[in-house]
Amino acid sequence: MIITKIIGGLGNQLFQYAAGRAMAINNRTELLLDITPFKEYKLHKYSLMHFNINENFPQPKHISRFLPTGRKRFFRRFSFFPQKSSSYICEQGMGFHPEIAGLKKNEFYLDGFWQSEKYFLSIAPLIRNEFKIITPANTANLLAAEKINACNSVSLHIRRMDYVNNADTNLIHGLCSMSYYNQAVFYILNTIPDANFFIFSDDIDWAKQNLKISSPCTFIDFNNADTNYEDLRLMSQCRHNIIANSSFSWWGAWLNDNPGK
């Protein structure tokens, strides 16, 4: 079995699942999702139950085989920690680690974000199928989807809240500037003059006040943190995507199956 730790926002959770799924298939074993970190982590909620995946969870005794002291902070200092026939693998730095992706081992625990398509590119069609959202959309989202599918739709995602309010997060990620969005919109309109923009943001009021686009715009203001998978579904249905420096909107664009996006 391979256990992958699930933590962070929805975009992070999708990367963690996808990488773990590919490694489990590569080693012909099952994937288990460790969601116990959400007992202490309150910034986001576990959200993968809304997707077309098989959710299998490890028992505490399974996790303890990889973390024998029960103190995860200690083991985060190690990138590879052998424990009998099991291993604890902690991501060291961002980027793709081919030595981990190609690891041949029946049992290990993955602790990281694994934010590279290279981890799961070999099973991309499977991931696209498993990341279909199975929770039925409500009326507002169904109407938005109809509008999106009836025009040259372009999603535009602005991420602000934790990037603005958390100094450490802002230091790491920064914010996409208005210049970035203005240039992106200019590029889109030069290519697609009849583009219709659909605006997504975790600070939609700020977006309404600061985003100035002369073309038709629809602000998706009826979803919230608990239903952000609905935003993801709508973004993936748009024909084109303007993304933030965010794994959330990255997935919205990746799941868009328009070959000309």
Image (tube, grey):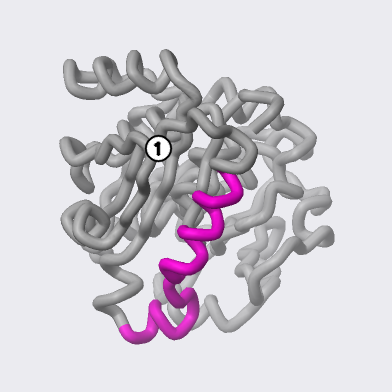
Q: Residue at x 33, y 45 (%)?
A: 200
Q: Residue at x 47, y 59 (%)?
A: 182
Percent x, y for residue 98?
82, 59
Q: Residue 197: name its quadrant.
A: top left
Q: Is residue 179 magenta?
A: yes
**Element at label 1:** strand
Question: Label 1 is placed on what type of residue?
Answer: Phe
- Judge left or right: residue 126 versus residue 139: right
- Judge left or right: residue 183 versus residue 108: left
Residue 39 visible in the current orientation: no
Judge the density around disc 1: few (<14), some (14-19), many (≥20) Cα neighbours within 10 Å. many
Q: Residue at x 53, y 40 (%)?
A: 241
Percent x, y for residue 78?
63, 79
Percent x, y for residue 192?
58, 33
Rendered position, 10 above or below 65: above
Residue 175 visible in the current orientation: yes
Q: Which range is magenta?
A: 167-188
Residue highlighted by disc 1: 197
Q: Residue at x 68, y 34 (%)?
A: 29
As rendered, which of 60 and 215 lies closer to the eye? Answer: 215
Rendered position, 37 above or below 214: below
As rendered, which of 128 and 151 lies closer to the eye? Answer: 151
Percent x, y for residue 147?
34, 18
**Marker count (numbered):** 1
- Judge left or right: residue 71 versus residue 16: left
As rendered, which of 19 and 231 lies closer to the eye? Answer: 231
